[in-house]
Amino acid sequence: MNSILKSISSGKEYPLNEVRFTSDNGELLDVVHDFDALKKGRNISREYFSTQRTQLNGQPSGGVWHFKDLVLPDIPEQDVISKQEGNTRLYRSKKISSFLGLSKEKFFLKHEGENPTGSFKDRGMTAAITQAKALGQKAVTCASTGNTSASLAAYASEAEMTGLVLIPKGNVAVGKISQALAYGTKTLVVNGDFDDCMRLIREAQEKLSAYPLNSINPFRLEGQKTIIWEILLQLNWQIPDWIVFPGGNLGNTSAFGKALHEAKELGWIDKMPRFAVIQAEGASPFYKAFKNNFAQLTPEKADTIATAIKIGDPVNYTKAVRALKWTNGIVESVTDEEILEAKAVVDAAGIGAEPASCATVAGIKKLMERGEIKSSESVVGILTGNILKDPQVIVDYHFNRKTVHANPPHDVEPNLESLKKYL
Ligand SMILES: *Cc1c(COP(=O)(O)O)cnc(C)c1O
């Protein structure tokens, strides 16, 4: 075996084929790969990943499985459950960069909404469900603000496993719940919030042997690491000054930190970009902990229009703190109003993303105004989910708002005269 599970705090190790999500003391676990052992049988050089077009079962391996030897090296290729996730585009946009005051040449948006079910969750899901199947698990579960359940539903169907998703009542965007239902997974609407759902999932794992695919599952984060590696490939190894993304349960924060830490260990990079994690003001326990020098995390009741990051008690907190230390990172919070304004700009640029994703752009704007990010610096922002995930927010905004970005439809009579004035 080339990998083990290891507590991030005590260092206690467990075999990879043990079904566990925390150490005996409840600490989070990393999947740790033995690079020296891997180097003996395989090519894991930067050169290799930069130049080879890898395949998985005769098809292009996509962004995640391009890095298979550093994600799940010991799983046989034919056992991987994949929909060619990853290989998402890195956009440049004149409209968005000028809204932010950044140079168009140095500002990029990585669109993870271009994954098979419309969010980055697919990158984690392909890895974690592959591991679940390899462990002989029959049922997979998650608590979800929406996108994890959409993704789990699609992958459980593909893997022919029983899927069970728990979503908080009244808090899931219509595009996401539609997917969970349509892909045929059992969907339970819990009379509680996301954090209640998460607690239930952890109990169900212990008492009902249902295998969780939330980001507490360290294999999820192995898949999500590849977002960062793919960005580095796309930028031809020019390390950006900043990588900016939203934080909810802090799975991405943790996974991205690990990706860069490993890239450094492997000798792929010699300096670190800085992270800026953006939270919604009404769901900002990580921001508050950051302001407090990470003295402690105080769970809170979350409230924001950006339902994907409406999380008050992030499970990956300790890993996320570690990631910020590795990257000299910062945390910012933005209001729902700022998120909606940024979203209107991202959408009108013809790119589009769901509200939580646009916290990224709202956060960059705020950090620029504060002088934290300088206009001369290079910035990669991550858009985490597809524009069609939350159509209700869009319709409400454009029908009802009186802002400069609002673009309401107009009622007209069926004649050319009435079209003329709009041209
Ligand atoms: C899950 C999700 C997030 C939050 O990511 P974490 O890894 O939990 O911090 C942000 N945006 C979208 C669209 C998501 O689906």
Image: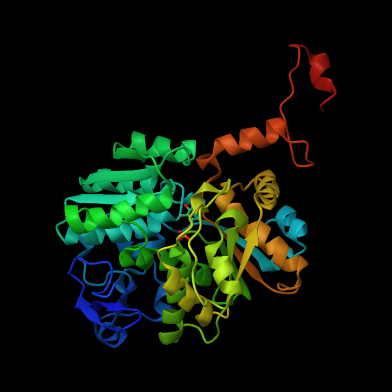
Given residues 127 and 341, the one toward you in this image is: 341
Q: Quadrant of residue 415?
A: top right
Placement of 17 over or under 387, stated as above or below: below
**Horizontal and vertical percent for residue 9?**
35, 81
Residue 293: percent from left, percent from top: 57, 78
Q: Where residue 274 appears, x then y in whole percent?
A: 59, 76
Looking at the image, the residue that sits furthest to the top is 414
Instruction: Answer yes or no: is residue 41 visible.
Output: yes
Q: Is residue 20 above or below residue 130?
A: below
* Residue 212 visible in the snapshot: no
Q: Quadrant of residue 350?
A: top right
Q: Residue farthest to the left? A: 136
Up-down: is 145 above or below 300? above
Residue ID at (37%, 46%): 149
The residue lying furthest to the right in this view is 421
At horizontal 83% and vertical 15% (from top left) the residue drawn is 417
**Depth order, front residue of 389/351:** 389
Residue 108 percent across, percent down from the top left: 63, 63
300 to the left or right of 93: left
Which quadrant, please, contains the N terminus?
bottom left
Give the left or right position of residue 316, taking residue 4 as reference. right
- Residue toward you, 123 or 16: 16
Q: Is residue 22 left or right of residue 339?
A: left
**Residue at left 26%, top 43%?**
157
